Image (spheres, rainbow, N blue to C red):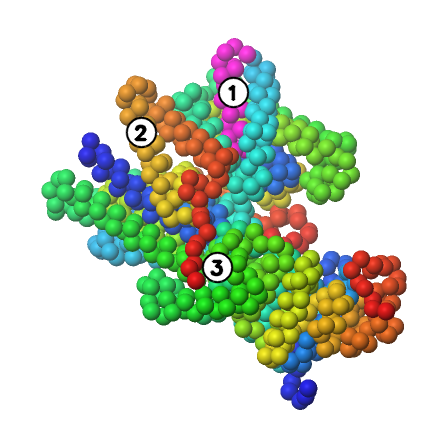
Amino acid sequence: MSDFLISSFTIAGIYALMALGLNLQAGWSGLLNFGHIAFAGLGAYATGIVIQAGGSGWTGALVGVGLAMALGWAVARLGRQLGSDYWGIATLAIAEILRTVATNEGWLTGGAQGISAIPSLFDGLPRPWNAVAFLALVLAVVAVAALALRRVANGRFGRALRLMREEPQLAACMGYDLKSLKTRAIMAGAAVTALAGSLYAHYMSFAGPDYMVASETFLIWTMVMIGGLGNTAGVLVGVLLVQAAYSAVPFAKDFFGFGSDLAGALRLGLIGLILLACLLWRSEGLIPEKLRKIPA
Amino acid sequence: MTAVSAPLLQVRSVAKAFGGNRVLEDVSFQVEPGEIVGLLGPNGSGKSTLLNLVTGFERIDQGEVRFEDRRIDRLPAHRIVDRALGRTFQLPSMPTKMSVIEVAMAAATAHHGFLDTLLGTRGARDAEVRARVEADALLKEFLLTPVRDLPSSALSGGQKKLLGIVCALMGKPRLLMLDEPTAGVHPNLRNDIVQALKRLNAQGMTIVIVEHDMHFIREVCSRCIVLDRGHIVASCRPDELSSNERVLQAYLGGGRAAAESEKVPA
Amino acid sequence: MLQFLVDTALRASDLALIALGLSMVYGLVKFPNIAHVQYAMLGAYLTFFLRAAGVPLVGAILLSCAVTGLFTLAMHLLVFRRLLRSGPAIAMIGSLAVAMLIVAALQGVAGSFPRMFDLPLSAPHEFADARITTTQLLTVGTTGLLLVGFSLLLFFTRAGRAMRALASNRALADASGLNAERITRVVNFGSGAVAGLGGSMLALSTGAHLNLGHDLLLPVFAAAILGGLGNPLGAVAGGLLIALTETVVTNLNFGFLFGKPVAFLPVAYIGAASFLILLLALLFKPYGLFDRQVRRV
């Protein structure tokens, strides 16, 4: 049981990082990034490829962050001309292209088999302490990221983003370069998400193209929307909730004894239902973004 | 008022068309430092478009715009503001998820870097404090302190206009361009605006006001430029307006009788 | 050469109807409905099950179209109309949720194993160097007929004019007395039915499988965007372009580039080709190839 809990929370933590990265774009900047998972994929693959080539985990993570930020920059440039929903489709397309490349360029990415035998970071420790240590690392990273992002959101940059999201003209006449703001927001979100991808690669000892399926982005969107778009605490709550629903299904499966197809369907259906219910009745999420208090 | 120094704003032969519709044709005028200039004209004369062109929210088709003797007509809007030219909007729309003080603080010019914010350095914190203090001071001057912590979208139309002015002022502009600052504003508030503008001007700010309200113009402006259907038809003192043939024609003659808000003084 | 044309026509007809439906509805609701491709998948599965229950193929397809159309209408009435009040972004995310639900429901009911249609085997017909099966012929033929019928409807009937008016300028159309809501409902039903038809015919060759919808997402959106969202016949043209590119890319021997006698693009990259076209389209012509107006996005 404790193994299961440790594992669940580790995964939840990794998703939390990705969700925080998405929140920066979707929540505070109003950018509909539907290819978000590509950033995580780059982080995972960078880690795998660098380690395979003999480099260290740190280098891998750094390379992953760099690549993701480069992709973020490119994607932001694409957004200069496009309306938000068109841009969302474009990001989806980019993520799919990257996934296709990852599946096919076996010489680089191991193809559909991916890259295995990525060391797990705390292999030196005996069980269960290696898992606990990893969990601690993940939680620490999430805590730092959440605090850092919240600080940024409450500062000048965050204010500019939040203004731009609703009133771009007003932001422009205050001297903010909207394109630059969007680019920086996406790049920052990309960096955090790539880190999550690197951690995931270490955790699973594996990096594969399935990390970048579109449904992963949709899952993270669900977490963010359910929890509360634009609210750091809300996002974390959303992650926990969705992860709980996801984890509950295998239990129900064992308890009620239904097949794995049904289990998969139930997982997906549950998430979809929660998301839809959320959008229909509480589109702000469970913990909506609140007005920030600025004492005189 | 000496006019030895170069004009603050120069608009030369500016033209703009939307589709086939020629909104502005060969518009030229100057604004000297320290003036309060009114930009008038009936509906459809092109006043707001002119404002948008000068402030970079629309691209001019022909001509040039110079601010402090440097061309600005090619610059994007946010760079023009950097040059100390501020503006407000006719129908100010304010964000729903930000309080009035936050919106005002967003307009602060104190730049501190992303890294500074992230690390919470002294520089960043000081800049935040300065921004807040400045914003609070301006809010107080424009009587918005009671609504300081409300969501900015909850303000009345008149209050939003004031907030717009506050935001423009936070940028410490040398030229302030206002788009119909008193339209839809409560008469009491209107007087406050008049006083505030006079105060600013006394402190050296040059102001251009796009307006309908003739009384307001007479109270505040030293000079008026009148547009009619995309052309400048007059540039004179406010008290000369009622005797100016072309002005009268613009407001009363041909097609649109602008009876609603234009009150041509007797 | 002829085979090349046949392949293009087949792929184009796979995409045409679904892209047409998507574009048609977008003109009225103004948000990209990600669930639309799943309606096609729904139609495919319904046809399969009806046929498995003994309904003859044509009847099964017709019935499935009707049900899919009704489902689409229901989604519009119950979900999207409400979500649109909060804006197109929320509606788009909502369509994501609906898509998830459709996939989940089908996975739960039908399982993840592809369901193949057991159609009577027959030798493909041969024309010159091209081969085409009867099923494929019927598919392309049906698609072609429908497109002709749709064009006639769009340009020569009052209903079609009303639809076009509504898509291009809603406020004006409303003011001129057109019943916007009723037209929107009818169009929703129609687009769903047509998507179901497209999906069913596609499934005749590939079988009804859980990825049917998702695999169509980007090619169909690419086609619709290339043609200009809101321009249904443009979407068909877009589909043709996508099909053409895919066929060219598959058949082109890139050996000359690498100094090798034979070098073909890996099959998986064919999908990427349409994504790439989509990206290029969005970069240079976000309002479609046929757009002549300059609009602020």
Where's the C terminus of chain A, which quadrant?
Answer: bottom left
Q: Nearer the viewer, mark 3 or mark 2?
A: 3
Would residue A39 be seen by someone viewing this image from the given angle?
no
Amino acid type assigned to the residue bearing label 2 in the image? Ala
Crowd class of label 3 (few under 14; some 14 to 19; many from 20; radius 10 Å): many
Q: Nearer the viewer, residue C168 or C17?
A: C168
Which subunit holds the residue at mark 1?
A: C
- In this orientation, which residue lies closer to the viewer: A80 or B39? B39
Which numbered circle lies on residue B102?
3
Q: Amino acid at mark 3?
A: Glu
The magenta span reads C35-55
Pointer 2: what residue?
A248
Q: Please tell me how crowded label 1 is: few (under 14), some (14-19), or many (20+) other residues with Cα within 10 Å.
A: many
Classified by dominant secondary structure, the portion drawn in magenta counts as helix
Left or right of A143 on screen, residue C165: right
* Residue A171, placed above or below residue B234: above
**Mark 2, chain letter?**
A
Measured as percent of width and height from the top left, residue A74 is found at: 45, 56
Q: Point out the frontmost of discs 2 and 1.
A: 2
Foreground disc of the pair 1, 3 = 3
Say if the magenta span includes residue C44: yes
Residue designated by label 1? C46
Q: Is residue A84 above or below residue C68?
A: below
On the image, the x and y values in percent for residue C284 come to 58, 54
| Residue C82 numbered tag | none
